[in-house]
Image (tube, grey):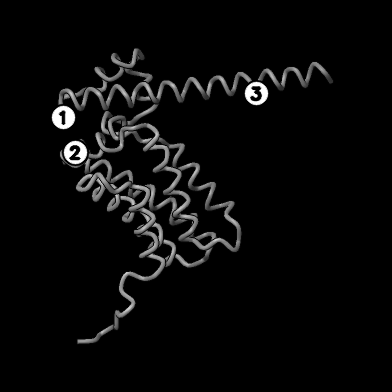
Amino acid sequence: MQESAYAGAVSQGEGGLRERKKLQTRAALTDAALRLALEKGPDSVTAEEIAEAADVSVRTFFNYFPHKEYAILGRNPAHLESALERIATAPAEQSPLTTMWLIVRDVLHDLMAEGELSRRGELIMGSPSLLYHLMLSSMDDERQLSAALTERIGDPLRARLIVSAAGTACRVAVELHKDGPDSAPADLVDAAFQLLAQGLDPDYQKGSS
């Protein structure tokens, strides 16, 4: 019994160590990708250069990212996994928009903690290739989040609109922060979600002329 418990503890410890190493490797790759993209321009960077700068093999690079653009974008699958888990486990009384605000808040907090939101944002805005891949990845995220929210609330139109509006609110907040750095992204996101909750245009009348 004691041996089994010890073996289980060792197994959990090894699993935790593996996960930490994976996180460290992913961080090293995204850091190297961003640094090289800023130095050389995203179109001039190769996956091989990123792998070399992160001191890993090219094969390891492709275990984490399907192409260099995802590494430069800093795509972190843990964000989507956490968001799907939050939707699935949200209290019944919690509004869908509140759930999405909590998801965006957590992701934004992580991005701000990394201190790379502005630099990566400027790089993306200036690169058609990065914008294209960001759009593709965002569409896939929205599809999965919408499916999860639809399962929870049973209304696919409402679910898709809420998820799409939440993503747009975050993007607009980041863009406004870039234009006016005095406004914190988190404050802009809060204001945007408040507008969504209140209704963007309460005076809207269908078919009025």
181 displayed left or right of 74: left
Mark number for residue 129? 2
Check disc 3 and report its element: helix, strand or loop. Answer: helix
Place of residue 89 in the rendered image (x, y in percent of width and height, measured from the top left): 59, 51
Can you name the residue that lies furthest to the bottom here?
A: 209
Please determine whether, in this image, residue 17 is positioned above or below residue 190.
Answer: above
Place of residue 186 in the rendered image (x, y in percent of width and height, measured from the top left): 37, 48
Work out how far the residue at label 3 is from the one at label 2, CA to CA, in angstroms.
Answer: 41 Å
Please determine whether, in this image, residue 53 is positioned above or below residue 189.
Answer: above
Q: What amino acid is found at the position of numbered circle 2 in the picture?
A: Ser
Please determine whether, in this image, residue 175 is positioned above or below residue 24.
Answer: below
Q: What amino acid is found at the position of numbered circle 1 in the picture?
A: Asp
Q: Which residue is mark 1?
A: 43
**Which quadrant: the C terminus?**
bottom left
Place of residue 37 in the rendered image (x, y in percent of width and height, measured from the top left): 21, 27
Mark number for residue 168? none
